[in-house]
Amino acid sequence: MKRYIHTILRGIVGGSTMLLFAACASQAPVQEMSNARQTLNLARLANAQKYAQKKYIKAQEILDMAVTELNSGDFTEARRLALQAAQAARQAQLIALNQQKK
């Protein structure tokens, strides 16, 4: 009887863990999208559209793709693209700040 209860509990815990991971993966990447938008805004404030135009435009294009994926329900791809957009925006911001120091 003890072994039977242990097996059932193990199954419940394992199943709950799987559901938790599935729920996390299927949630909209709200924070990642917000971070990407904020990082792009910081790049804009650093005049990246002037000093790092190509990188800034690329970041905006990637963010636009992330929005498209988000709207289509592909949250995994939207999350990946939002992270990529934030990285490109950060690079544009750094380039712009370094160019202004010269």
Image: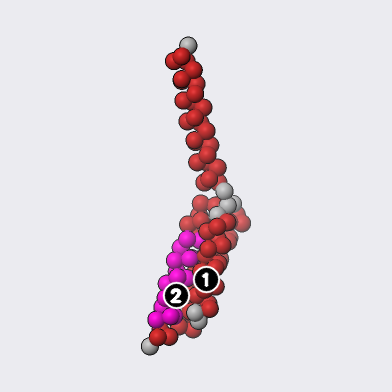
Distance between mark 2 and mark 1 Cα atoms? 9 Å
User: Is 89 inside the magenta-drawn segment?
Assistant: yes
Which quadrant, please, contains the C terminus?
A: bottom left
User: Which residue bears the numbered disc 1?
Assistant: 40
Q: Which mark is residue 92?
A: 2
Q: Position of residue 21 (x, y in %)?
A: 50, 41
> What residue is shown at x 49% (from left), y 17% (from top)?
5
Q: Is residue 39 visible?
A: yes
> What residue is shown at x 41% (from left), y 78% (from top)?
95
Where residue 97 sits, quadrant-wise, is bottom left
Majority secondary structure of magenta residues: helix
> What residue is shown at x 55% (from left), y 46% (from top)?
26
Q: Residues within 10 Å of mark 1 (few under 14, many from 20)?
A: many
Q: Is residue 65 above or below residue 14?
A: below
- Identify which amino acid the numbered label 2 is placed on: Ala
Name the secondary structure under disc 2. helix
Q: Residue furthest right?
A: 71
Q: Is residue 31 above or below residue 96?
A: above
The magenta span reads: 82-98
Q: Residue furthest left?
A: 102
Q: Which mark is residue 85?
A: none
> What residue is shown at x 53% (from left), y 63% (from top)?
35
Where residue 71 sits, quadrant-wise, is bottom right
- Identify which amino acid the numbered label 1 is placed on: Leu
Query: With 30 as the anchor, is 93 left or right in this view?
Result: left
Q: Position of residue 34 (x, y in %)?
A: 56, 62
Q: Position of residue 53 (x, y in %)?
A: 47, 79
- 24 or 63: nearer the viewer: 24
- 66 or 12: nearer the viewer: 12
Q: Residues within 10 Å of mark 2 (few under 14, many from 20)?
A: many
